[in-house]
Image: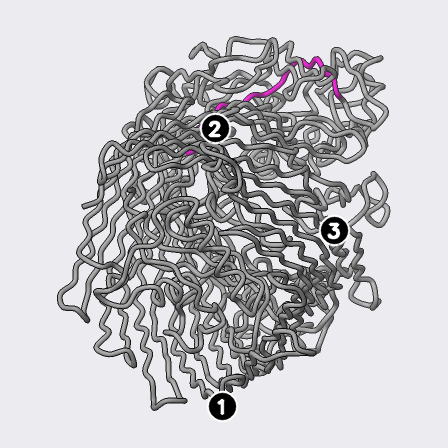
Amino acid sequence: MSPTEARPATGTTPPDQAATAPLGTSPVEQAATAGASGEDADIIVTGFRASLASAVDLKRESSQIIDAITAEDIGNFPDANLAESIQRLPGISIDRDNGEGRSITVRGLGGDFQQVRLNGADALSITGGGNDASGANRSRGFDFNTFASELFGGVTVTKTTSAANDEGSLGAIIDLTTGRPLAYKKDRYALGLEGEYRENGKTVNPRLTGLVSKHITDTLGVLGSIAYQDQKQQIDSYQRSIGAFDYAYRNSQLQGVTPNTFGFARPSTAGTGATFGSDPAAYALITPTTLIPALPSINRQDLHYKRLGATGTIQWKPTSHTELTVDGVYSRYQQDLTTAGITTIGLNRNGTNANAARGALGAANTAAGLTNRLALYPNCVPSATLDCGQSLNGGGLVAGTRASYNPNNLNPFDYYNSTVSPGYIADANQSAFYTQLIGRPNTKIRAANVNSAGQADYLVLDDVDWRSSTQRVAGKTEFYQGTVNLRQDLGDTLRFDGTAGYSRSKYTGETTLAEFNAIDQDNYTFDERGSGKMPVFSPGFDVANPQSWSLVKGLSSIRYLTDEIVNTFRVARGNLTWSVNDEFKVLAGMTYKRFSYSSNQGRRNSDIEAINPTLAEARLNITDLGQTLGFGKGLDVSAGTPTSFYAPDIGKFVNQFGIDCNCINKWGDFRAQVDARQANRVTENDLSGYLQVDWDSTLLGLPFRGNAGTRIAKTIVRGTGSVGAAANGVIGTTVTARNEYTDFLPAMNATLEFFPDTLLRFATAKVISRPQLAALTPGTTSFPTGLNATTAPQITVGNPYLNPYRATNIDWAIEHYFGRGGIVSVGFFIKNLENFPQQIAGEYPLQSIYDGPTLQSILAGITSPTLLAYTQAGGTYAVRQFNDAPGGKIKGVEVNVQSNFSFLPAPLDNFGVTANYTHIASRLNYLTSAQLATTRTQSGTAVNAFAPGPFLNTSPDAFNATFYYEDKKFSARVSGAYRKQYVTRFPLAAGTCAVGLTTNNGAVCNSPVISDFGYRDSQLNVDAAMAYSVTDFAKLTLEGRNLTNAATYSTEYQANPVAQNYQSTGRVITAGLRVVF
């Protein structure tokens, strides 16, 4: 047996008796409790086949539509965490991060639309981002990768709701439960020791699990479990960043160059400016609206994470009428993710739009001439929140310079143009190295091909600027939860049950980034005309040679960020159940919940991220700061693409420059200034009550059961944010806002057994999911500092008055049960979403956004007299804000088949299969363009454009299957999970105007709408597991995940897809020993 095999027995108590068992326990746990009665309990679930049968019993007896996994099959699926296990259920797909499940989608709806409960209390768990640049989770969603699956005794996914269920889910209620000591007949001790081999990186890592369950008396028991995992892995990938920068013209209208290039260097010297030299025929192919690969890259990730989880339970059952359970859960997930890669940074860079025409800068020895030249480069300007070296170097300019205060880190203008600088370049116009820093307008096209979709699928380029960067994200998530569940009979017909709980999840992260650059490299070749999943990506120079790279003043960045996100939750819930007679029950209860969310972010001043010491200033060699890394594990690397490259070593940068000191040192200002735009606080108080009738009777002589009732839910939101805040330490004005709303949520579930062992189900309900807590702040992420003569001032602001997502769900199902654990079922579902809040454009005076006291505090913080007068007079602002937008519709069908082969002769009777298929059709109107008001005098100029698309991350077709064999000594199974290609992003870029040179009121549109799709390609993941019982208490195990080494492949653009992400996490093989005493 594995540790999870020694788990509670599973019977057939109906899941809807959550109101008559301890509130907050899932159907799995209730059945476990029902199947065990003190010292007379037997462990019924002892194998994979039995656990599947137990889950089918739960499904059959429920008055709602559910799917469940019991202890044995969670513990023995070849799964890394809970998400990997839950994906085996119908209608559920997972999104992977770093090769393992992080979040789930149920019937087309993601984490924000699910309700995850742990031992009866809502759970919010957050981690940092991983391989797909997913970032830290700031939503209501639950990050399943924080927990090992061994900690849990069962998972139940309830797909239809009842009035007795707390509101908050449009998709499903997911109940996670830990073990119960009184479900065991005697004391139990279990231990699992495993080693995990990862093909990519060739590492062997430990995985340890343990469980202790002890009876203090016949009525009092304690249980504790622990799981620990220490993992290292390598993930290699090719990526092409998605965005408006793929258009050749965007942000390339370099001033001072005539005629404008709107892309690359011009073919000839005709006109003015320093950028020319492209091949005329190739240049003519690249029109301004040609799509080019602006930011392709090859990347290597080295991930090290440690996952520690522990549970503790005290269960007291003095009589059959009383049961008290106290649970504690702790989880700590530490992740150290280092991502290194090389990319064509110059193809997305214009350098500056300052007037660069030689002779137009003015005399170098005049104040105006100096100002113009400083504008050509990044420039450190001392302020209250920015130190340019003055605090440690006396406050005066460095001798021989015109704008530098730090002798160890000169301003870029002085570095290239002052004779005292180690980087001095003689230039009569004192604009040295400017042309090299421009980026794409200085890049020459030597050869090109443009396909019928307007995509440049072949390019040969000279004078390309390259970036080799390394980013390290060190994050830690700690999760605590405590719950108390009480069940008490109050006589023969009345029962009370209640839950009280508290949880806290805190994520802290630190990000450091450093980069090398190689300027003006020739013979870069990009070729996507082949049939592989990765284009030819040939830099044209030796990227593995350290001497190819350097620290370039004004370009090579050093970045430092800190993040903190905290979620807390409190719940108090009470229910009364009155058994009117054998056929009817009346249920009533109330629930109070309090969610609190806070986030903070600090970042090194972005104005100086590219102003750092060079090798010459620091008196270092490039080998003092970098390392050579291999590339291509698990990938079919295209010919000409490097298989190694030289990249910064974050540890060496820390040692040499102290870039993570969060301080001012001799090399620069490395403080993580508070970004008050990210400093948000939201508190949500939810109070609800319900009345429900349950019945178990007959209809036309056929067994008929179900429930019907209504829940009333009141929500009160209070948000705090900052108006007028900006990056780099500008705090702004702190504001608060309050909102409340009430929802009436009727629900009904009905089940008719119209043939023996055949059930017909119907359910309908009004449901809500509340908005992301982070969207409910009244703060702004952009706010004007002055008033333009004609255009309306623009702001981007949160919305504490946002309505919840509201929907009507309808479900039908036909289920036929046979044999022990056999089922064939077909389910149909429709979800009509009334609204879907999105960030849309509008025109309002501030008086319509903020109430009186809040408005007065904002007005007090406006320093521009003209802006203040305009605002006080009710002037129109162009506002970008989350508001109600058109809803959508999801409809689908689920088919589920499960059977053992006991009807066959031995040994074939030891085989069995479980399989399910889900088809989903969905449609949602997505915001594609939010064009803000452009004039102060004309109303109605804000325009919001929508376009239809499917729900994101929703596969139209998904299939899961497990084929298994099990006898008394040996068990084996193979599992497959297939997802058909699905949309991950739409639109590719939301903008303010249409693509083009004259579409922005006659000007160039640098924020164009790209109403196109990003896709995740179809993928089949195959896993397997085998186990052999050496003795009655010891078992050897062998498991494999991703046995076919299925790579993740994503594309963008519907008409002619191009590779956007191609990565491999490799195979994972686990072997170990599990013992139970």
Element marked by disc 1: loop
The residue sitting at the left extreme is 216
Give the residue at x 71% y 36%.
251
Separation (CA) of disc 1 from disc 2: 58 Å
Report which residue position mark 2 lands on: 1065
Q: Which mark is residue 580?
A: 1
> What amino acid type should be assigned to the residue bearing mark 2?
Thr
- Give the CA distance from mark 2 to mark 3: 30 Å
Does the rendering let one see residue 428? yes
- Magenta residue span: 457-471
Residue flagged by tag 1: what amino acid is it?
Val
Relative horizontal placement of residue 445, taking residue 563 as reference (left or right): right
Q: Amino acid at mark 3?
A: Ala
Q: Residue at x 64, y 13 (%)?
A: 524
Q: Residue 202's quadrant in the figure?
A: top left
Residue 675 horizontal/vertical position (percent): 46, 54
Residue found farthest to the front: 905
Indicate left or right for 281 with 598 as reference.
Answer: right
Pointers 3 and 1 in contact (CB under 8 A)? no
Q: Tell me if residue 284 is in the magenta stretch.
A: no
Q: Secondary structure at mark 3?
A: strand
Q: Residues within 10 Å of mark 2 (few under 14, many from 20)?
A: many
The residues tagged by marks 3 and 1 sit, at their Cα atoms, a distance apart of: 43 Å
Residue at 26% across, 33% down? 1073
Residue at horizontal 71 percent and vertical 57 percent from the top: 890
Q: Is residue 784 left or right of residue 559?
A: right
